[in-house]
Structures are given as C-alpha cells and as structure tokens.
Image (cartoon, rainbow, N blue to C red):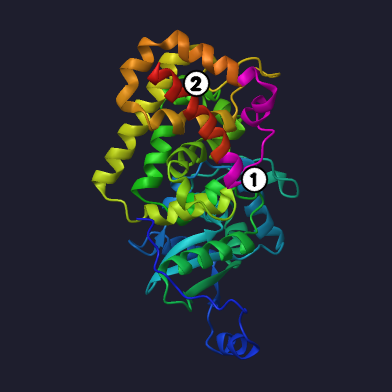
Amino acid sequence: MWKEKATEKNKKGPSKTNIVAKYHSREKRIMTEINREKLPSFAEALKKPGYMNLQPFYQRRSRWDKQKQSRLIESFIVNIPIPPIILYEQNYNSYEVIDGQQRITAIRDFYENKLKLTGLEFWSELNGLTYEELHEVIQAGIDRRSISTITIVTESTADPEEAMLLKQLAFERINTGGVDLSRQEARHCLYHGKFDELLLELSRQPIFAEAWGIHPQNDSSDNELAKNNLYKKMEDAELVLRFFALRNMEYFRGTIANFLDLYMIKSMRFDDEDIESLREIFLETIELASELYEENFFKPFDAKKPISYKAYYDAIMVSFSRHLSKAELLILKKSQVIEETKKLCQDPTYSRIFTGEGKNTKTDIQQRIGLFEKMLIKVIGD
C-alpha cells in the first residue's frame, strides 16, 4: 500500500528551462468554469439523481443553525454579495461540493419549506415564515437572485495521488465559508468512503467517546454535542485516524497533518476486508487499554491537568496494537503495567512528551511510542 515508485532526482535542482517547460505543460494548474444560476433553478437541479454529491454535508457535523441559514436568505433579499460555491466535476454534469455545503443546505431547505426564517435583522417581519408563506412579491424578489458557482474541471496531472493533493490544496485555499473547516472536515469532504465512515463509526465507540468527554449520542441532545469542540470539528474522528496512520510510522513524511492527508488518500483503495481488519484492531486495542488503565484512560499519571492528551493516547494505542497477541498476559500483569507506566509519566525526562509539550515531528512521535513500547516489552518479558 505504501510502496512508491523509485524516481531519479536531479540533485542540482530544476533548471530554468525545465521550470518554463513545466509551466507551459500546465502541470499543477487547475482549469475552472464560472457560472451563475437563479436560485429556483439551482434548488431544482439539486433534486437530479447524480447531479451533485450531497454526502459531504449530510455527513458533516453541521455548523450552521437556523438563524445563520435565515440570514443567508435575508442577504439574498437585501442583495448582499454571496461568495461563490466551489464544485469539483467528478464526471460530466456530476459534481462534488468543495466549498459551500452550508449555503447549499440553506437554499435547499428554504425552497423545500423546511426552513422557518428566524433572527432576521432587516426583515424581521418575515420571521417565522417559510418560502411558501411569503408574499408573492417577496418570493419573486428572492427568485430573481442568483448564486455563482466555480467548477474545477480537471487537474493537469497524470498522477492520481498528486491530483488528490492538488484538489485538497484547492479546497483549503478556496474555502470561503463563514466557519472555517477543520483539517479533518476537509478530509471528510474530500476522501469520503468506507474508511471515512469507519472513522466516524469508531469515534462514537462508547469507551473512546467517554475517554474524550464526548457524551454518547443516544444520551445527549444535539446542542450538548455541538458544544464539544472535538466532536464539532471532527477532531474525534481525526484521533481515530491518527491511530491507524501512526501504526505506519516508517512511511511518515512531512508534518503530522500532511501524513494524515496521505493516509486518507491511500485509504481510498481499502476494500471490505481491510476495513473489517482495521475495525477489529482498533476495538481490541481500546478495550485492552481500558481494561488496564480504567479511569486513567489516556490520562498520564501525575499530569498537571487530569485530562486526556493526544500524545499519550498515541503512545498507548499504537504500542498496545502491536502486542495484541499478549493481551491476556498484559491483563494478568495489570499491576506491573500500571507501576511501570507511572514511572514513565513521573520521570521528568519523559513526562513532558506525554502531555503535549513535545512536538509532532516524526522523531518526537517515534520517541514517545518507542518509550511506551519498550516499557510493554519489559513487562511482557519479565
């Protein structure tokens, strides 16, 4: 999966001739089309099967409430300029939303009479009304408004991985929404598939969710979940992704964010067997860690703040996942595991790297995972 073709690199760097040739070849350049469409036509087009991939904003944890949606409609009434929606052409006349999920949702809900206007500032008289309840003059005024779209037609590269990275670059730099996407929300929209669904599924696993202070969905209202930044920004799903990616540290390159991006790209090739295998590894690992540490789950012993730390989570999860065959032995030696873990956490030389003070370079991550695994091997061997 991680094998890469060997390529010869020019140690002296690219020549001016090569740079000019690259530019003329349109390599690493994106072709776009710009269109404007009346709001009723745009809303109607959304109903066409296969026309637009709405999956990203059905699955994304919505960040716009009814008031924000209503104010978008009010902006159309007042004729305030609205940022364009950015689309990616997957096939002819079939699009994926890169930026504008919330605007599209608001327009769709408004024309389907699912949105009761609320919190309007300039047109408070319209609060509480749906589209069909508006006076026909107001309806006609809104119907005259248009929404602009910028469509990315194709990337000029033959390398599919490079095309995906170029697409992500466009997504991140073009994004103009009222609420910036987190890195994981961007990955979710760009690389939606079986693996992405697995990340969402595992992030709701009760043991995991409780460890990060995220109440189970069936015990919490949407408002309670919306207050949790990890959940709201999909950082809980990113934590699950970190686990899978960091089990492949030998392929780490760039920053941790770049490495997670790369793993998501690779994940697009996973089949059902791969997904099931990864699910089992995660569940077995988290159950083992929970059995051993109980209330100190992902919380370093004697840390200044009794909270879960990502760096400590990385070390525990990746290390335990490599020794699942010794799970029964580790449980049998539970007291020794706890004692040795305390020694690691209390050692001033190492304690800081488990509480987020350490950096996220490849060397730093390998160090903390290596220290924890060395401790486990010592316990298993005793």
Q: Residue at x 27, y 50 (%)?
A: 271
Height in image: 261 above or below 381? below
What is the quadrant of the N terminus in the image?
Answer: bottom left
Q: Verify whether residue 93 appears in magenta.
A: no
What is the quadrant of the C terminus in the image?
Answer: top left
Residue 274 visible in rendering: yes
CB of mark 2 within 8 Å of CB of mark 1?
Answer: no
Q: Left or right: where does residue 282 sit relative to residue 272? A: right
Extreme residue toward the right, this view = 122
Question: What secondary structure is the magenta-colored segment mainly?
Answer: helix
Q: Which residue in the protein does label 1 denote?
A: 68
Q: Which residue is drawn at 42% across and 25% down?
A: 377
* Residue in the foreground of this view, choosing between 302 and 113: 302
* Residue in the foreground of this view, choosing between 359 and 126: 359
* Residue in the foreground of this view, choosing between 200 and 83: 200
Q: Position of residue 207 (x, y in %)?
A: 44, 21
Q: Residue at x 61, y 16 (%)?
A: 301
Query: Which quadrant would residue 63 be assigned to in this image?
Result: top right
* Residue in the foreground of this view, choosing between 66 and 301: 301
Q: Which residue type does callout 1 highlight?
A: Lys
Write down the region rendered in magenta: 345-365
Q: Which residue in the protein does label 2 denote?
A: 210
Residue 105 visible in rendering: no
Instruction: Tell me the element at label 1.
Output: helix
Q: Which residue type does callout 2 highlight?
A: Glu
